[in-house]
Image: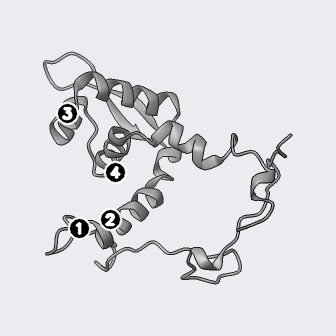
Amino acid sequence: MDPNRFGYSTLNCSIRRTLDIVGERWTLLVLREAFSGVRRFEDFVGALGCPRDVLSARLRTLVDEGILRREPYREPGRRVREQYRLTEKGIELFPALLALLQWGDRWTADPIGPSVEVTHRGCGAPVTMTMGCEQGHGQLSARDVTAIPGPGARKVA
């Protein structure tokens, strides 16, 4: 363990702040559906089986945080409604969801295999998450990295 680990506050940790936004179970599942192309409230309800008030709150948080945006649509003969679309900020969460999926496929999938496979549209090959550094070294694991204080690190008083 890093001897300086407890010399810095964790109150402004990026993981903590991210989990404050997307760390609730239903929120990650809403994002899963959004990445699958679900856009409309009723479709989210049908896909998730989530209580409507909970879904409304999760969608509101994702919109307030700039991860989803509301966009009006109108079916012929119906009133204007809103649908939800991923923003650039939201799309950048895809690798995090894919990493969770990949971990789940390895450790929690049914014995016959995972329920969904993510493939490259261009060639059909499975997509995998790998960790690398800016110098091009790839296939790193937690044993290959270290965390050091960044410019936002705050010393504990």
Q: Residue 145 appears in which quarter of the rendering?
A: bottom right
- Disc 1 and disc 3 in contact, CB within 8 angstroms: no
**Relative to 58, is 150 on the left or the right?**
right
Q: Alpha-carbon neighbours of circle 4 within 10 Å: few (<14), some, or many (≥20)?
A: some
Q: Which mark is residue 109?
A: 1
- Disc 2 and disc 3 in contact, CB within 8 angstroms: no
Picture quarter with the N terminus: bottom right
Q: Position of residue 74 (x, y in %)?
A: 24, 24
SS at circle 4: helix
Residues under labels 4 and 2: Cα distance? Answer: 17 Å
Of labels 2 and 3, earlier in sequence is 3
Q: Nearer the viewer, mark 2 or mark 3?
A: 2
Where is mark 4, residue-wise? 35
Q: Nearer the viewer, mark 4 or mark 1?
A: 1
The three-letter code of the residue at mark 1 reads Ala
Of labels 1 and 3, earlier in sequence is 3
Of labels 2 and 1, earlier in sequence is 2
The vertical placement of 30 against 120, above or below, is above
Q: Residue 119 appears in which quarter of the rendering?
A: bottom left
Of labels 3 and 4, earlier in sequence is 4
- Between residue 145 and residue 10, name the one nearer to us: 10
